[in-house]
Image (cartoon, rainbow, N blue to C red):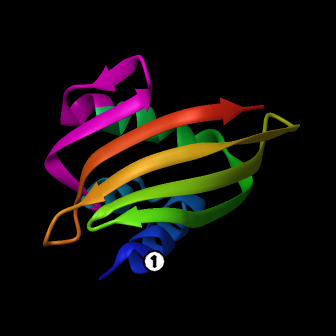
Amino acid sequence: MNIDTWLNSFKQYWTQHDVESVLSLFDLNVDYYETPFHKLTTRKDLEEAWNGIHNQQDIELDLTVFNQNQNNYSVIWYLEYTQKGIVKKCAGSYLITLNNENKCTYFFHCCESK
């Protein structure tokens, strides 16, 4: 697996509302920032945050790597989905580090715009 495979799996699991598989992409000890100021500290916190995808319909997610340094990646993302009949659009960037097992050990969600 490489970053492209990881991102493709991330996208597939998200659009299929498969929280368990999304979580399988992350190391058990991941440093995960839902926002630059909100670190999720437990696996349960991570699962609760990801359970929000169950409310998203017609998900369109684009992910593009724009920088790489060894196993560290900067990814631009664009997300569009429908929730309760309202179309929501947002974009931003992720900072991602993968370990030798291609599990994410660092995930930093930043620069979101709506």
Pick the residue in front: 92 or 103: 92
Residue identified by numbered label 1: 4
- Bounds of the magenta segment: 25-45
The residue at the point 44 percent across, 72 percent down is: 9
Relative to residue 6, is residue 66 drawn left or right?
right
Q: In this view, does 65 lie above or below 31?
A: below
Side of 46 where 10 appears, left or right: right
Q: Which residue is located at x 33 percent, y 79 percent?
A: 2
Which quarter of the picture shows residue 82? top right
Could you say where residue 26 lies in the image, as x and y percent from the top left? 25, 54
Going by the numbered disc 1, the residue's amino acid type is: Asp
Q: Secondary structure of the magenta portion, mostly? A: strand
Q: Is residue 34 magenta?
A: yes
- Residue 80 position in % (x across, y down): 77, 49
Q: What x and y, as percent, mark residue 33?
A: 36, 31
Look at the numbered disc 1 and give the secondary structure of its residue. Answer: helix
Number of numbered labels in the structure image: 1
Kindly identify the residue that appears in the image at 14 percent across and 72 percent down.
101
Relative to 113, does residue 6 appear above or below in the rendering? below
| Quadrant location, the C terminus | top right
Q: How many other residues sit within 10 Å of disc 1, few (<14), some (14-19) or many (≥20)?
A: few
Q: Nearer the viewer, residue 94 or 69?
A: 69
Q: Where is residue 18 in the image (x, y as percent from the top left)?
A: 44, 59
Is 77 part of what is drawn in magenta? no
